[in-house]
Amino acid sequence: MGGTSVSAVRWFLSLVLMTFLAASAAPTPLYHLYQQSWHFSATMLTLIFAVYPFTLLVSLLIFGSLSDHIGRKPVIFAALILELVSMGLFITAGSVADLLLARIIQGLATGIATSVLAAALFDSDHHKGPLANSISPLIGMAAGGLIASILVEYAPMPLHLIYECLAALIGLQALIIWGLPETARRQHGVLKSLLPRIAVPVVARPALLEIAPANIACWALGGFTLSLAPSLIAAATGATSALNGGIAVALLTLAGTASVVTLRHQNPETVLRFGTITQATGVGLILLAINSAMLWLVFAGFLVAGLGFGASFLGSVRTLMPLAAPHQRAGLMAAFYIMSYLAFSLPALLAGTMVRIIGLVNTANGYGMVLMVLAAIALVGQIRRRKAPSCP
C-alpha cells in the first residue's frame, strides 16, 4: 500500500493511538465492580491503577527511541500484540493478581505505542500530525471510559465485553499496520537507544520548576479521576450508575481536547495561566458538589476542570520545548514525563491509602484542597515571572 494517502495514514495512526488510550481508560467504570466482587480495599484499587503509569513511564524511557533504529511498523505491531495480551488477561481475570499483571502489560504496551505513534504521525504529516498526536489520546480516553460505562450498564458480560470489543479492534489493526508504508530507515545503535536519556538543559531548569505546580496538579487530577471518581460519585451522591464514572472521564478529557484545539496558537504563558485558574475553579466546583450531593454539579466541575486540564498540559509543553535544542529535547521530555507520570500515579495511590483512614469524601476534600494550593503556587510563580523583566 505504498500509494496510501497521507490523510488515510494519519487517520489510521490516530485511530490506533485512540485505541490504546481507550483501552487504558476502559477499566475505570469496572473498578467498582471488581471491588464489589473480590472485596479489595481502595488502596488496592489505586495500586491496580498506579502500576499502569509506572510501567508506561519505564517503557517510554527505555523503548522511546527504538523505532528510530528498527522502523515504525515492527514496533507498532509489537505494541499491539502486547496490548492484545493484556486484553486477554482482563477477559480471563479471576483475581487481583490477574488485574495487576494485565495493567502492567498494558502500561508496557502503551508506553511503546505512544512514542512510536507520535513519531509515525509526524512522519506521515508534519503539519497535522502533531495536533493529531495531542488530541487523539484525550479523545481515546473519553471514548474508552464512556463506552465501557455504557456496556457495563446496559450490555451483558459487564466484566468482559468491553475488552472483547477492544481485542477485536486491536487484532484488526495489527493486521492492517503491515500494509502501511515504512517511514523510518533502519539505523545502528539499537542497544544504545535502550538507555534512558534524562537531562534538563540548564536554560530550561527554571521553567521546569515554574511549570511544576500546575503540571503536577493537572496530572494528579487525571489520576484521581481515572481511579477513584466512579467510587467518589457513588459515595457522595448515592448515584450508583456505572455511566457516571464514564461521563466524568469523558467530560474531563473532551473538555481538555477542546482546550488544546482552541488555545494551541495562543501565548504559552496565557494558556498556562488560563489552565491553572480554570482547573482550580473546576476542582472547587467538584468539592462543592460532593459535599452537597449534587450530581449535575459534579459533572459541571469535571467539565470546567477539563478545560484547565488540557490548557495546563498544553501550556507546560509549549513553555518547555523552545528552551531545548533539537538534540536536547528527548532528555528534557524524559524529565517532563517522569514528573507527569509520577504525579499521575503517586497521589492517587496515597489517596487510596487515606480512604481507609478518613473515608472517600474526606480524602477527596483533602486531595482537592492540595490541588488548589498547587494552583495558587503556580499562579504566584507565573505572576512573578511576568513581572521579572520590569524589575531593575
Image (cartoon, grey):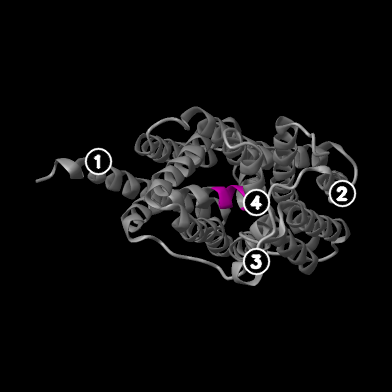
Q: Residue furthest right?
A: 156
Q: Is residue 341 left or right of residue 55?
A: left
Q: Amino acid at mark 3?
A: His
Between the residue at mark 3 and the residue at mark 1, the CA separation in whole angstroms equals 45 Å
Label of residue 171 in the image: 2
**Which type of secondary structure does the marked residue at label 2 adopt?**
helix
Q: Amino acid at mark 4?
A: Thr
Residue 175 percent coordinates (x, y): 87, 47
Between the residue at mark 4 and the residue at mark 3, the CA separation in whole angstroms equals 22 Å
The residue that label 1 is drawn on is 386
Mark toward the start of the polypeptide (1 vs 2): 2
The residue that label 4 is drawn on is 114
Q: Are marks 1 and 2 in contact (CB under 8 Å)?
A: no
The residue that label 3 is drawn on is 188
Q: Are marks 2 and 4 in contact (CB under 8 Å)?
A: no
Between the residue at mark 1 and the residue at mark 2, the CA separation in whole angstroms equals 50 Å
Q: Which residues are magenta?
A: 222-227
Residue 166 percent coordinates (x, y): 82, 46
